[in-house]
Image: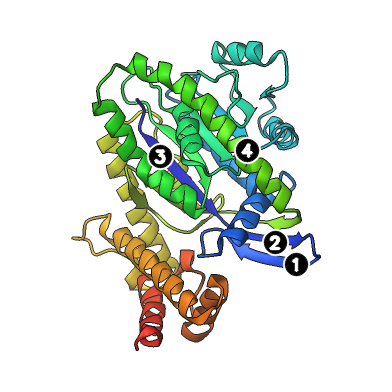
Amino acid sequence: MRPVIFMVYAGAMRWQTSAGEEMEARLGEGNTKDITSQAWRTALDPAGDWISKVLEAANRRLTEVRLQIPDAGGLVIATDHASAKAYAQLLHQMTGEEVALILSDDNGASERIDSYSHGDSRWMVAVRMVSEGVDVPRLAVGVYATSSSTPLFFAQAIGRFVRSRRRGEVASVFIPNVPALMQLAAELEKERNHVLEGPGSAEEMWDAEAALMAEAEREDRASSDLEEQEFKYQALASDAHFDRAVFNGDEFGGYAEVESEEELDFLGLPGVLEPQEVQVLLQQRQARQARRSAAKQGLLEHAPDRAEEPGALHRTLGEQRKLLSSLVGMYAKVSGEQHKDIHTELRRVCGGPAVAQASVTQLQKRIDLLRRRLRP
């Protein structure tokens, strides 16, 4: 089975509620569950910049993979028919190629899947996971552009990309920085190893997957239908930036503008690598990004020491972010304030950019302030 690199993208979202209230939030910044859901749906709006930029990044990644795997394909998993058609149009404009559009109520869907599977075209767009089944071993790049966060659905969706044909193939899946998805992505490698080490052959596992997929799709449709009834809104604007890469349970890199050298470093990884090579290259890209950040900002704290392990800086950043998020949650329970308001206040008092862009020292100032406020 292919190892998976998750390319995580965040960004600023703006939308209007059914009551006419204009809202704004950033993906991945400790928002409430409702705000996260609304920001997530805004990100997936076909008319916004977020999904367009993520599709461009995924297409660039696919181009890199096809240098070594000429028939490598990409799959975008959409929430509904309207979004799927819009995504397919965007990809057609980017590539100049026809996109295989798979709609679950289309009688010709199975034939189009089969034609795509045996061809060498770049992209396929499907609504959810398509109950007809998607078994296309050449899929190497994915975009998770659906609002589902059920563990079974996510696991089976990622299963579309892990069936390798030869040694060294690596899958890349682009996901929004949503806490539920980040947790699922971090746990997936452990689950994958458990499956590989457990009893039963690979064939038995894939046979069982068909039944699991059908169950996951039914579960997700029911959950999504309920959310649609409860959540009516109008997306106003969105933007995207590269946030990090997740591989084998570890996180690499940090904030990078779209089309920047830092983002292109991660998108430009070779398509054929052994897992240990992926780990090393991600650490190198991370260290390079830190050095560039230090050079641009004149802050030595961003640059790892030459003798330091390349992953050590990011582990520190990751630990600081998690600790800050935990403290914000604790303070919210005590004060009754919303997470986003606490983050805004911390930035006002302590200075510095948003969490995704903040340095270790900037994060530590906010942590220290919350600790003082939480002391009895």
Alpha carbons under labels 3 and 4: distance apart = 29 Å
| Three-letter amino acid code at the position of disc 4 | Ala
Quarter of the figure with the C terminus: bottom left
- Residue ID at (52%, 32%): 216
Please report whichever mark, 2 or 3, sits nearer to the chain's N-terminal start. Answer: 3
* Disc 1 target residue: 22
Alpha carbons under labels 2 and 1: distance apart = 7 Å
Please report whichever mark, 1 or 3, sits nearer to the chain's N-terminal start. Answer: 3
Look at discs 2 and 3 and give the one toward the viewer: 2
Alpha carbons under labels 2 and 3: distance apart = 29 Å
- Residue ID at (36%, 14%): 203
| Three-letter amino acid code at the position of disc 1 | Glu
Please report whichever mark, 3 or 4, sits nearer to the chain's N-terminal start. Answer: 3
Residue 5 lies in what quarter of the image?
Answer: top left
Q: What SS does tag 3 mark?
A: strand
Residue 104 lies in what quarter of the image?
Answer: top right
Would you say the residues marked 2 and 3 are in contact, meaning their CB atoms lie under 8 Å apart? no
* Disc 3 target residue: 5
Alpha carbons under labels 2 and 4: distance apart = 27 Å
Would you say the residues marked 2 and 4 are in contact, meaning their CB atoms lie under 8 Å apart? no
In the displayed structure, 179 sits above or below 200; it is below
Would you say the residues marked 2 and 1 are in contact, meaning their CB atoms lie under 8 Å apart? yes
* Disc 2 target residue: 14
User: Is residue 281 at all visible to an observer of this figure?
Assistant: yes
Please report whichever mark, 1 or 4, sits nearer to the chain's N-terminal start. Answer: 1
Q: Residue furthest left?
A: 307
- Residue ID at (70%, 31%): 88
Would you say the residues marked 1 and 3 are in contact, meaning their CB atoms lie under 8 Å apart? no
